[in-house]
């Protein structure tokens, strides 16, 4: 019997687990109950080794050994987001958490609950059908994807548990039709760099600007000049985004402050361009500081970064025919996304090839209606929005089928 002919046997488990996780989201690096549940389910499935607290945070690793063959790493992320969930389903989250002294709602608004539940479903199916495959499956439940440190925080401890892998596989749910899988080779998600720029002026009385170096005017000029990087320095054949998302200075309208701080977010799909843009930011910021007569150069800190997700053509070449056979016309090429992921850092730690694909979460009819009306962007909630609540099925089945198919494409007998 084909492993996926037995899909119905894990469906109640996957759905119940998903509803529980959806109703009980936890923020990045606080996934304690989630991680404990993930470890419990791996043990209940009969995974040979289960390790908790792997790395700097709440990471969980399960190892399913099944004879000779390659070692395949599969990953799901565990964290939710500070979002108050819309009232759409009876298993909605009403959880809250404290951040910086304030209370926020918590929601699985990026679908990481889909990733965890479907991965557990796939592992259970594979454990029930050990005769159908051969090799080693390394199951990674990763914390803190949303704050980008989670994968990086696990790699050293992971390599101590599992010295080498042959391929890493991951998937993400998105507001595509829930029957669909989207797969492409090459760069599919952007690299992201967050920079905090602090410019130093000289403060003074708002009525006497001649005695000061005004960091507000300096910051304003930097914001405008930074817009020329993408429009004037990036070739039209390449893509990049540079956003100044925050600007903070001053306390009172008649005081010229000493400093101003700018928060930049940069997205690129190519390492060379990524370096060139960061060099251009440095050049423009320091050039504007010099032009303003700033008493000292700006400080530029990189506070957050994630690599480009660049799917290996060889792995995609193995997955494509397997997905085509399983999903037929529901496998479609993936367009590039400007969002970022830290999944590839797990593969990079082993210098192993990887592929990351997307599955849908919107009812097929609803998606088709919005597409026909030209309202996809406004009518279908996207990841991170309070209305991003994937339809239960076929979302979970599609994700279980995709991950199981991908593992068997590498380990199947
Ligand atoms: Zn997200
Ligand atoms: Zn996500």
Image (tube, helix red, strand yellow):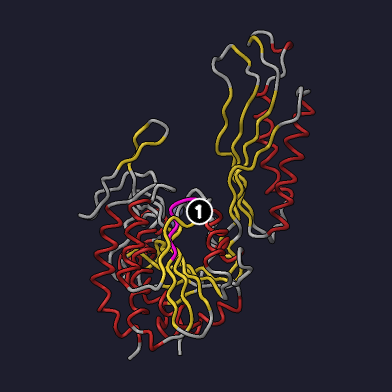
Magenta segment boundaries in residue numbering: 56-61
Circle 1 residue:
150
> Which quarter of the image is occupied by the C terminus?
bottom left
Q: Does residue 288 appear to the left or right of 11 in the view shown?
A: right
Instruction: Where is residue 268? Give x, y as percent.
Output: 63, 55
At which x and y percent is residue 309?
Answer: 58, 63
- Please give the name of the residue rendered at 59% of the width and 50% of the height, measured from the top-left corner: 305
Badge 1 density bin: few <14, some 14–19, many ≥20, Cα 10 Å: many
Left or right placement of residue 319 versus residue 203 in this view: left
Camera-side residue: 193 or 76? 76
**Whether the residue under disc 1 has CB within 8 Å of ligand 2:** no
Residue 214, quarter of picture: top right
Write the residue at 50% across / 48% down: 147
Verify whether residue 59 appears in magenta.
yes
Residue 297 placement: quadrant: top right
Q: Secondary structure at mark 1?
A: helix
Residue 321 counted in the magenta span: no
How many numbered circles does the render carry?
1
Q: Could you tell me which quadrant the N terminus lies in? A: bottom left
């Amino acid at each position: 019997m084909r492993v996926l002919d037995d899909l119905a046997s894990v469906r109640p488990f996957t759905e119940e687990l998903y509803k529980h996780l959806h109703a009980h989201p936890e923020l990045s690096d606080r996934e304690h109950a989630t991680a404990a549940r993930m470890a419990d389910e791996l043990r209940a499935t009969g995974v040979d080794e289960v390790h908790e607290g792997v790395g700097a945070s709440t990471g969980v690793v399960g190892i399913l050994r099944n004879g000779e063959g390659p070692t395949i790493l599969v990953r799901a992320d565990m964290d939710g987001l500070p979002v108050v969930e819309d009232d759409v389903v009876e298993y909605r989250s009403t959880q809250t958490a404290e951040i910086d002294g304030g209370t926020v709602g918590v929601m699985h608004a990026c679908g990481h609950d889909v990733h965890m539940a479907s991965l557990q479903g796939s592992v259970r199916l594979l454990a029930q059908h050990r005769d159908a495959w051969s090799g080693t499956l390394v199951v990674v439940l990763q914390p803190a994807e949303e704050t980008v440190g989670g994968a990086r925080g696990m790699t050293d401890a992971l390599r101590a548990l599992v010295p080498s892998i042959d391929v890493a596989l991951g998937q993400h749910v998105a507001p595509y039709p829930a029957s669909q899988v989207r797969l492409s080779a090459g760069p599919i998600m952007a690299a992201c760099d967050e920079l905090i720029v602090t410019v130093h002026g000289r403060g003074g009385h708002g009525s006497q600007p001649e005695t000061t170096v005004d960091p507000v005017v300096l910051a304003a000029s930097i914001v405008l000049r930074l817009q020329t990087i993408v429009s004037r320095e990036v070739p039209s054949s390449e893509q990049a985004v540079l956003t100044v998302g925050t600007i903070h200075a001053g306390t009172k309208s008649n005081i010229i402050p000493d400093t101003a701080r700018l928060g930049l977010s940069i997205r690129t799909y190519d390492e060379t361009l990524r370096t060139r843009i960061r060099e251009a930011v440095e050049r423009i910021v320091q050039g504007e500081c010099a032009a303003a007569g700033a008493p000292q150069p700006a400080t530029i800190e990189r506070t957050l970064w994630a690599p480009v997700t660049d799917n290996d053509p060889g792995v995609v070449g193995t997955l494509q025919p397997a997905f085509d056979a399983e999903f037929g016309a529901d496998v479609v090429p993936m367009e590039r996304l400007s969002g970022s992921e830290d999944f590839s850092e797990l593969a990079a730690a082993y210098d192993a090839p990887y592929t990351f694909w997307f599955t849908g979460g919107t009812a097929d009819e609803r998606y088709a209606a919005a597409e026909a009306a030209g309202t996809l962007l406004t009518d279908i909630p996207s990841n991170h929005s309070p209305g991003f609540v994937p339809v239960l099925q076929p979302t979970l089945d599609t994700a279980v089928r995709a991950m199981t198919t991908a593992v068997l494409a590498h380990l199947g007998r």
